[in-house]
Amino acid sequence: MANTKAMRWRSALLLTGALAPALARAHTPDGLSPAASLWHWDVEWWVLFMLAVSALLYMRGIWRLWASAGWGRGIGKPPVIAFAAGWLTLVLALATPLDTLGGRLFSAHMVQHELLVVVAAPLLVLGRPLAAWTWAFNPAHRRRIGRAVQTRWLARTWAALTDPIVAWCLHATLLWAWHLPVLFSAALVHEGVHVLQHTSFLGSALFFWWTVLGHDPRVGRGTGMAVAALFTTMLHTGALGALLSLAQTPWYPPYLSTTAALGLDPVQDQQLGGLVMWVPSGLAYLVAALGLLGRMLTRQRAG
């Protein structure tokens, strides 16, 4: 049996021989050992630029809004704190060595994805960034932005993407599709695919949490729909996490060489990543659902 297992590992490594060099070039800086490269800060300039612009526009918008409406009015302090926490989570996920580590360990990559989907996305939505960013511009530009977002094609696109059912289906489809071995492996090897993966994860999560957290009046009138969306998302993401945790063979060939280079077992690393999706992520959806139910009961008592 030991010989059979060894042969299976050798076969898998041979099959991924073409992918491993490309992965190493994409995630391991020249001249650094695999272990040393884990702490190498290799952040794309455009990621830092977009993070900086989003923060500066938000701060300028809040400053101008509060200067006009009064301190803490229009957008209160809790949303500002939520946006700051969500922004810092994006920095942690995208602009630290965690991104490099995610290219070599599946478990780290899963932590990165969950930070984007179940931590940064809901916090950013709670921060009301669209309103704050709009206030960053002068009144004339705000009027132009208002007219632009009311154009028929843009209004219809926004209505479609923020429809509760569409947002749920889009988010679920992308989560499952990107975890197919062929797509996940492609994201590890090709930086452009990797960017697309992270963008689609964060984008679909933002639309999902937008509908769930009540910014859409279609959801504001039905907390039950939001709670159902959270519970069903917890179930299907938990199922995917369970499949990864219980698998006895590795799903993603590029990790065979990178994980082994660090002296770790690729199957155990994959199982750990599955547990990250299964337990902490599921707990986040559960806490959000209970929070919505608690808010609904509070309003009923007050009424």
Image (cartoon, rainbow, N blue to C red):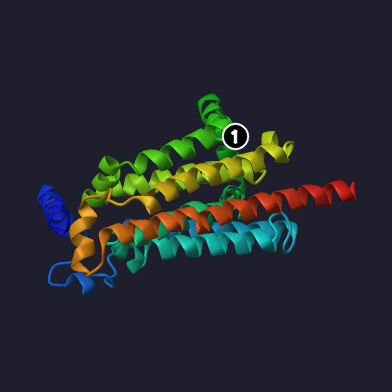
Residue nearer the viewer, 143 or 203? 203
Up/down of 112 relative to 264, above or below: above
Q: Residue furthest top?
A: 152
Of 227 and 119, nearer the camera is 227
Residue 69: in sight, yes or no? yes
The answer to whether residue 277 is above or below residue 260 is above
Asked if residue 112 can be seen in this view, the reply is no
Dividing the picture into quadrants, the one containing residue 183 is: top left
Task: Indicate the position of residue 195 as horizontal and vertical percent values.
Answer: 32, 49
| Residue at horizontal 48 percent and vertical 53 percent from the top | 278
The answer to which quarter of the image holds residue 257 is bottom left
Which residue is rendered at x = 40% and y = 54% of the image?
274
**Residue at the spot x=67%, y=43% of the render?**
214
- In the image, residue 233 sits, relative to residue 87, either above or below, namely above
**Which amino acid, by three-letter code, is at mark 1?**
Pro
Characterize the local packing of mark 1: few (<14), some (14-19) or many (20 or more) Cα atoms within 10 angstroms.
many
SS at mark 1 in the image: helix
Q: Which residue is mark 1?
A: 164
Residue 139 place in picture, x, y as percent: 62, 47
Residue 50 position, x and y percent, is 41, 55
